[in-house]
Image (cartoon, grey):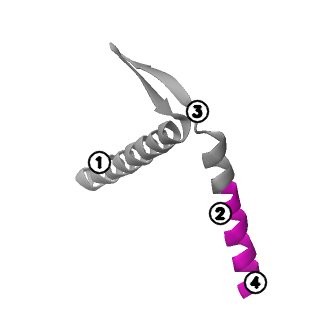
């Protein structure tokens, strides 16, 4: 069991390293009137973080709405 966890951890680390090395090229980003260049990996991390925060916020709002109706 311990060796399976170690192999899975190694696979995840290698996969993450591949994603980071393949997405270092700068991407041009347009937001409203702002334009800039951001490395691809940073853009993916910011997008994932924003989605995570929106998901947690939506969950909390739904739970709060269900409590207020009771």
The Cα–Cα distance between marks 4 and 1, rounded to whole angstroms, is: 45 Å
Q: Earlier in the sequence, mark 3 or mark 4?
A: 4
The Cα–Cα distance between marks 3 and 2, rounded to whole angstroms, is: 21 Å
Q: Is residue 19 above or below residue 7?
A: above
Residue sitting at x 53%, y 26%: 27
Q: Residues within 10 Å of mark 4 (few under 14, many from 20)?
A: few
Which label lies toward us, 1 or 2?
Answer: 2
Tell me where residue 53 appears, x and y as whole percent: 38, 47
Q: Quadrant of residue 54?
A: top left
Tell me where residue 59 appears, x and y as whole percent: 39, 50
The Cα–Cα distance between marks 3 and 4, rounded to whole angstroms, is: 35 Å
Q: Quadrant of the C terminus?
A: bottom left
Residue 25 has which mark? 3
Q: Label 4 belongs to which residue?
A: 3
Which label lies toward us, 1 or 3?
Answer: 3
Between residues 23 and 54, which one lies in front from this camera angle? 23
Residue sitting at x 44%, y 41%: 46
The Cα–Cα distance between marks 1 and 2, rounded to whole angstroms, is: 40 Å
Q: Label 1 belongs to which residue?
A: 65
Q: Label 2 belongs to which residue?
A: 13
Q: Is residue 2 above or below residue 65?
A: below
């Amino acid at each position: 069991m311990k060796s399976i966890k170690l192999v899975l951890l190694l696979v995840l680390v290698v996969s993450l390293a591949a994603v980071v090395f393949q997405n270092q090229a700068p991407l041009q980003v347009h937001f409203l009137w702002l334009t800039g260049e951001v490395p691809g990996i940073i853009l993916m991390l910011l997008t994932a973080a924003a989605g995570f925060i929106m998901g947690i916020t939506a969950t909390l709002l739904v739970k709060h709405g269900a409590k207020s109706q009771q």
